[in-house]
Image (cartoon, rainbow, N blue to C red):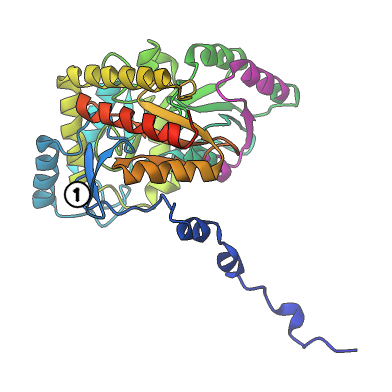
């Protein structure tokens, strides 16, 4: 009988084996259908250039069309000239500029809440807020279709996470009922997207509020895809339902309507003060650069002073909803500028995406785990600055390729 080497019991498996065995993406690359990490060599507006090919962009979240706005670009440039390219430290120590303080004050006023707190990214905002507010005896209830940043924030929190069926408030009540019957010792935080980033539908906030009050729960909304888009003044989901004072914490991001980078929360002053001094993701991360903060301030000026932009966004949204549905596409239950084109299996989704790309349409192929198995889709989204000519070309191209690939 062969003897094991003396160090056999202490030799670790190769950590990188999983990397070498990961072939899924390489197989799609080999088939010529790989839809990710595409380098854009122009400004990311409603038209872009990819590998020298002009394309109509319907894959970004530039809802207000402000990425290329002269005032936004000028504000970013001037801030870089005045303050430099970065802050070289965290907000907690040396990384707070007067720009950051001004931005937080403006955001709180705009959102009609006591206080605001700015983080370095939207993803980090959810991680840092959820993980510091939820303690070991607390419960988090989340929608099954929530963004990955919410899911990961829950993983970092010490409390227990329970899930309820997508936008189903009866199921939320059922889940919280079970939690309450099993000896709840802490508090409850319900977290949901305001506008769901893949489906494009809006959370049923009025019914959620009823459930929350029944169980004494707090509500946090991720309004990344809502601020600038929903509500008479663009303040998001709560304003859309006339419930600004009925949501405990609202989270937003700067990478969509605000045409920049970063994230924020608004809420009661005591809550914001607590997160500001407890959140590890805030305290141990460098603050957003001055150019990003200045760009948000300029974008906020435009959002407040040009409500016609939002009106144009919704005119474009209605046009695309009606156009896709009349052609026979399944766009699900979307109510917003996020318009999913349901395809089904991954292979068909990749082929349809490649056809669109070849025709000069930049859209996004979404497959599991971002969506449920068998629910792969082409995610499209629209802006206030898309022209009728651009949108007509998009619909014509989808109609032709939809028939070619058996989608319609």
Range drawn in magenta: 153-178
Residue 83 in sight: yes
Query: Where, by quadrant of the figure, is residue 214 drawn?
Result: top right
Quarter occupied by the N terminus? bottom right
**Which residue matches tag 1?**
42
Q: Is 186 displayed left or right of 310 in the figure? A: right
Q: Is 166 displayed left or right of 57 in the figure? A: right
Query: Where, by quadrant of the figure, is residue 161 drawn?
Result: top right
Image point (19%, 49%), residue name: 42
Q: Is 230 displayed left or right of 103 in the figure? A: right
Query: Where, by quadrant of the figure, is residue 169 drawn?
Result: top right
Residue 174: say if magenta. Answer: yes
Say what secondary structure mark 1 lies in. loop
Foreground pick, 193 / 275: 193
Give x and y (percent) for residue 365.
44, 42
Give x and y (percent) for residue 157.
56, 42
Foreground pick, 20 / 133: 20
* Image: 302 above or below 245: below
Farthest front residue? 404
* Image: 279 above or below 221: below
Label 1 crowd bin: few (<14), some (14–19), many (20+), radius 10 Å: few
Q: How many marks?
A: 1
Give x and y (percent) for residue 237.
39, 19
Image point (41%, 42%), residue name: 353
Image point (28%, 30%), residue name: 63
């Amino acid at each position: 009988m062969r003897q094991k080497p003396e160090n056999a019991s202490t030799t670790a498996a190769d950590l990188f084996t999983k990397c070498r065995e990961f072939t899924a993406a390489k197989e799609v690359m080999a088939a010529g259908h790989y839809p990710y990490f595409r380098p854009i060599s122009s400004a990311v507006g409603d038209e872009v250039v990819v590998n020298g090919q002009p394309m109509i962009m319907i894959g970004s979240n530039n809802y207000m069309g402000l990425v290329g706005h002269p005032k936004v670009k000028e504000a970013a440039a001037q801030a870089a000239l005045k303050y430099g390219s970065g802050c070289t430290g965290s907000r907690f120590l040396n990384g707070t500029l007067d720009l950051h303080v001004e931005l937080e004050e403006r955001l709180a006023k705009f959102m009609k809440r006591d206080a605001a707190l700015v983080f370095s990214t939207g993803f980090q905002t959810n991680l840092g807020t959820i993980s510091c507010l939820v303690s070991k005896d607390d419960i988090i209830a989340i929608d099954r279709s929530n963004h990955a940043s919410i899911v990961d924030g829950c993983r970092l929190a010490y409390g227990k996470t329970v899930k309820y069926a997508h936008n189903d408030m009866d199921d939320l009540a059922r889940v919280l009922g079970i939690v309450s019957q099993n000896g709840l010792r802490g508090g409850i935080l319900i977290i949901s997207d305001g506008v769901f980033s893949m489906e494009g539908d809006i959370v049923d906030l009025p019914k959620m509020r009823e459930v929350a009050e029944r169980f004494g729960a707090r509500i946090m909304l991720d309004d990344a895809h809502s601020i600038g888009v929903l509500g008479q003044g663009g303040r998001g989901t709560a304003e859309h339902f006339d419930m600004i004072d009925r949501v405990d914490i609202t989270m937003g991001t700067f990478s969509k309507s605000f045409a920049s980078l970063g994230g924020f929360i608004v809420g009661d002053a005591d809550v914001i003060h607590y997160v500001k001094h407890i959140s590890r993701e805030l305290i141990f991360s460098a603050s957003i650069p001055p150019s990003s903060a200045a760009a948000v301030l300029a974008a906020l000026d435009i959002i407040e002073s040009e409500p016609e932009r939002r009106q144009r966004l919704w005119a474009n949204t209605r046009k695309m909803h009606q156009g896709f549905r009349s052609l026979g596409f399944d766009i699900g239950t979307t109510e917003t500028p996020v318009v999913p084109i349901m395809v089904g299996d991954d292979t068909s989704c990749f082929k349809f995406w490649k056809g669109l790309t070849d025709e000069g349409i930049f859209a996004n192929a979404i497959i599991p785990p971002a969506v449920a198995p068998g629910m792969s889709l082409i995610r499209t989204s629209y802006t206030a600055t898309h022209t009728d000519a651009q949108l007509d070309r998009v619909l014509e191209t989808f109609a032709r390729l939809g028939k070619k690939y058996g989608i319609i």
